[in-house]
Image: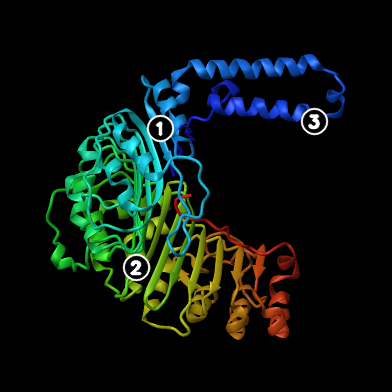
Amino acid sequence: MFRPGFHQNNPPKRINDLPPELIILILEAALDEVVKVSYYQGGHYLGTLKTLAAVCRTWKSTIQDTPSFWNVIESTITPNEMHYMLRKSEKCTLTFRHLMERFDYSGRNVRRRTGLDTSDFFDVASFNMSRCSSLSFAVKWYRQAVRVLGSPAPILREAVAIASDRDSVERIILFDGQAGMLENLWLSDIPIRWDLGLPPRLRRIKISYSDAPITWLPTPGQVVSALSTCGGIESFDLSGRSTVHGRLEWEELGVGGPMVELPMLKELKIENMSIAGSAYILQHLLTPPLRNLGLTQCLQRQVDTLTPLLYPPGPPLIESIRSALVCCEKVTLNVERKQCTLEIEGVGGHVYLLLQCADPDELTSWLAEELVSELSSVPELVLEASSSFPGPELRSLPKLMEALRNLVRLHCSQVYAAAGDLAEHLARPYQASDGWRWHWPGLKNLDLNDACHWNELALTMFRDRYGASQEEDGGTSVGTLKWRPSPLTSLRLGGMESMYPETFQEIVDIVGKEVLEEGAFVPEEHGWFG
């Protein structure tokens, strides 16, 4: 996540802006390659070779005489090199980097190492943490790094700490509570004292747990309290297989407690926390609309109601959804028996919800009621209803489709359970004050990937919506008896051509063969927190 010494927001523009150790490698590599060229080997351009060699020697001399060039202490160096570098850089800040070791199934180290022993590396790092500005390490056992993470680090600005196996239940006071300059923090399977807060200047935090002991995990109240100690936070990511201490019901959490204002927060991700826990955090944060909001809950053994999350919604949730729907590019909705997924992508932000719940229809109903005006301008819908037959999770789908008034692109990868509602919405006009109108009159791109499973229903829909037996004249003036929908520009029917060729041909005769020849509509794939 964080690469010490390299900043994506300020990339180097000239070769002299690169780290000196990288420049010397480039020059030495160039010299090695040049001498392999045939006409250089005969003595030609000897002056060029000498010039390159002189440049390399100059850079080596410069590096030898510049203390700041010796401040990156890595676990791959030898003890003698380490002592030399510490002596050379005694007036400079330090960077410590430890590479992950590899072990076989018996726990033996299988990576041939010529550098520092892990214990020696962390002894040196902990002794010099007062000079450390950047720390990154990956170890097998958490206890190996306890003394480093518990040492005061007054000038530390970024830290990455990763452990692959837990071997202690001890929770540490992060940098002994003395990391006042720390801005970037990434911890993986590192237990910390959440109740004591976080460093005050943190801007980006990522903390993850994988099958951690329950005593490591924070309560929702502790998360809110910890965030209150770093008011300038911009990105917060709490993820893993489990991220909350125990399973608490909404009634146990309560709704009391002060609101925490985070005016700089742009990204928030909470993974595998109970719905009640996520709701508690969102309802106690005051933030601007977020550029990225992600709530995923896919590993919970029990399902909850969505009521605490949606009624009322926390300010970050409702405002981020509204912002994402402004100039929205696409809405994705996937409804299953006990799970629902909502993704909204737009100029104003990105929202991703993946929730295991007792009644997924709660989300669909809430969207259709709470965000009617915002949904009316959405141009693209990706819809999936993966149940084998219609169920209560689809009760509010017709209402949501009515709210999406100006749809241009529709992609349905698996909607067998909702095929009836979808076909009726497309095939049945409604009476408006100025005549009969069609739902989604501007629909141009239609992808019915599983239409082969409801082929007769699809054929009827195409006949009713695009058939030639319509009475309207195609005009757009007020008073037209029945407004004609826009013709399709692209159509995809999945495997219908091979499974039901006659039905497929009838549909092609209705919409025109050129619609299929011009290319099918395929939605782009987007991930979370790229």
Q: x, y percentage for residue 346?
A: 47, 50
Comes first in the chain, label 2 or label 1: 1
The answer to whether mark 2 and mark 3 are in CB contact below 8 A is no
Separation of marks 2 and 3 at Cα, in angstroms: 67 Å
Residue depth check, mark 3 versus mark 1: number of the one nearer the observer: 3
525 sits left or right of 397 in the view:
right
290 sits left or right of 172 in the view:
right
Comes first in the chain, label 3 or label 1: 3
Q: Nearer the viewer, residue 190 or 15?
A: 190
Q: Is residue 18 visible?
A: no
Considering every residue shown, the one lying at the far front of the view is 80
Comes first in the chain, label 2 or label 3: 3
Q: Nearer the viewer, residue 163 or 448?
A: 163
Q: Can you tell which quarter of the image residue 126 is in?
A: top left
Question: In the rendered image, which residue does mark 3 sit on?
Answer: 36
Q: x, y percentage for residue 240?
A: 36, 59
Secondary structure under the numbered disc 1 in the rendered image: strand
Separation of marks 3 and 1 at Cα, in angstroms: 37 Å
Sort mark 3 into few (<14), some (14-19) or many (20+) by Cα contacts within 10 Å.
Answer: few
Q: x, y percentage for residue 127?
A: 29, 33
Secondary structure under the numbered disc 2 in the rendered image: helix
Sort mark 1 into few (<14), some (14-19) or many (20+) by Cα contacts within 10 Å.
Answer: many
Q: How many marks?
A: 3
Residue 363 badge: 2
Q: What's the amino acid at mark 3?
A: Lys
